[in-house]
Image (spheres, rainbow, N blue to C red):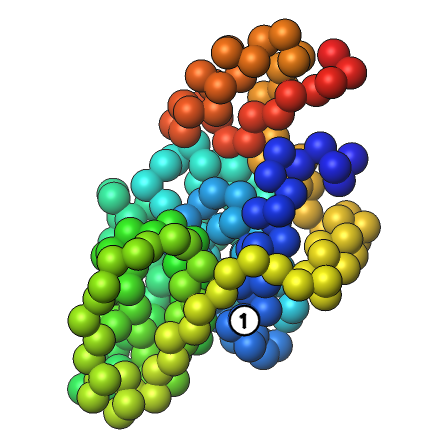
Amino acid sequence: MLFRFCHVNCVYVGCRAARRTGVKRGENAVVFGCGTIGIASVISLKYFGCNKVMICDFSDFRLGIAKQLGFETCNTSSEDFVKKAGELFGLAHGLNGEILPYADIYIDAAGANSIFEIFMKYGKIGSRIVMVAVNNQIRDLDLLHLTYAQKAVIGSRGYMPEDVCDVMEIMKSGRWDTEKIITHEFPLCSLPETIKKASDTENAFNVVINFDM
């Protein structure tokens, strides 16, 4: 059943991103991007001992799948991220004394420029962000803010053998019905239809070819 994942490499990549956060038991986390890497990240964060995790995206369809897996969600195109995160995690102080969500960890699994800006603006003192999504733009970095707020920016790419082992253990645990991220299956003879459905991100998540069909 494990190998029915459409993009199993992305699952390992998400686990690696969660590991790169240095998550400690009881911490809170926000993941931006409800794709395969984002879903794998939130599952891995919980597996590693994270207390509360919220996943953010623009797609209600994808967020609905995250909800079925038991995760808190936020559609950042229609909901107030700061308010919802504050209600879920509680409140903490920012660098200038402002009241911010008590989220220790941020993961960018979407690649939008606004995500790093959200972290810099709303991340509490001592928070950290792992950048796993591909974004090749050169960005300005407020080093003074980063230094005094004791924040960290961490890169993550690919995966290591320990991530593969952890994904295997996560699957065996049965805590999350990860098959929910596979929304459509097609036989090989329906390849054009498969590709068309896979591009419909508002109505499909992972689309797979079943060679037994």
Rate crowding at label 1 as few (under 14), some (14 to 19) or many (20 or more) other CA atoms within 10 Å. Answer: some
Q: Is residue 167 above or below residue 131?
A: above
The residue sitting at the top extreme is 189
Residue 102 in sight in this render: no
- Point 64% across, 70% down: residue: 49
| Percent x, y of residue 6 | 62, 34
Which amino acid, mark 1?
Arg
The tally of labels here is 1
Residue denoted by label 1? 20
- Viewer-nearest residue: 200 or 188: 188
Which corner quadrant of the image does residue 42 belong to? bottom right
Kind of element beneath mark 1: helix
Say whether residue 198 is left or right of residue 188. left
Say whether residue 126 is left or right of residue 9. left
| Percent x, y of residue 21 | 51, 72
- Point 54% across, 71% down: residue: 20
Quadrant of the frame with the N terminus: top right
Q: Is residue 186 above or below residue 44?
A: above
Which corner quadrant of the image does residue 96 belong to? bottom left
The residue sitting at the bottom extreme is 148
Quadrant of the frame with the C terminus: top right
- Point 66% across, 36% down: residue: 5
- Viewer-nearest residue: 44 or 96: 44
Residue 209 in sight in this render: yes
Q: Is residue 142 above or below residue 166?
A: below
| Percent x, y of residue 147 | 28, 90
| Percent x, y of residue 165 | 76, 59
- Point 41% across, 29% down: residue: 201
